[in-house]
Image (cartoon, rainbow, N blue to C red):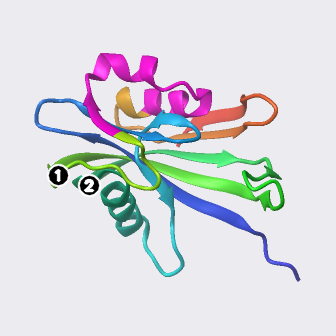
Amino acid sequence: MNFPTHIVAVAGLIINDDKKILLVKNPISGWEFPGGQVENGENLIEALKREIEEESGAIANIDSLVGVYSNVQSYMGWDGVSYTPTKVILDFIGRYVGGDLHTSDESIEVGWFEKENVLQIIENENLKDRARDMLEFHGKVIYRVYETKPVYSVKSERYI
């Protein structure tokens, strides 16, 4: 039996006391909310806190699960050699509790942005949809299935 291969990733919309939203600018995909892959043996919350701190310097508490997403398409990775497997992504809302913002290998800029500007700043359509889910979260978790290549297309979605 062959075991399936998936990437499990987490991301978070982090809000400070001034109600501003933390965004990081990825050198490839542009402005996005911090997050990344869950490492072997790591739980989801620990992974998200680690990714937020690594990418931005911010320390955050994680509150609510907002969405579960399946990017069901495998495609050629950035290296042009290996394939990126399908992904399961979990998005959360969190609160900034400390730390000094800084850039990293994964973020060429980091900043706090007004809530009403976030959807104009994020250019990637699937990230924009996920950001909208987090910005408009009202207690029901969304599950969305999509593909990103050649263009972003939603296959299904529902609240769970």
Measured in 3D between alpha carbons, the distance from the residue under mark 2 to the one under mark 1, in whole angstroms, is 5 Å
Q: Residue at x 45, y 76 (%)?
A: 42
Residue labelled with disc 2:
57
Q: Determine the image quadrant of residue 144.
A: top right
Q: Residue at x 36, y 28 (%)?
A: 135
* Figure check: 63 above or below 13: below
Q: Position of residue 121 (x, y in %)?
A: 43, 22
In front here: 24 or 134?
Answer: 24
The reply to whether dot 2 and dot 1 touch (C-beta < 8 Å) is yes
Left or right: 158 in relation to 75: left
For the record, the magenta segment spans 110-133
Residue 121 belongs to magenta span: yes
Residue 131 belongs to magenta span: yes
Q: Residue at x 34, y 49 (%)?
A: 103
Residue labelled with disc 1:
100
In front here: 22 or 107?
Answer: 107
Dominant secondary-structure state across the stretch colored magenta: helix
Q: Amino acid at mark 1?
A: Asp
Q: Amino acid at mark 2?
A: Gly
* Figure check: 42 above or below 131: below
Q: Position of residue 66 (x, y in %)?
A: 42, 43
Circle 2: is it few (<14), some (14-19), or many (20+) Cα within 10 Å?
Answer: some
Q: Tell me the SS state at disc 2.
A: loop
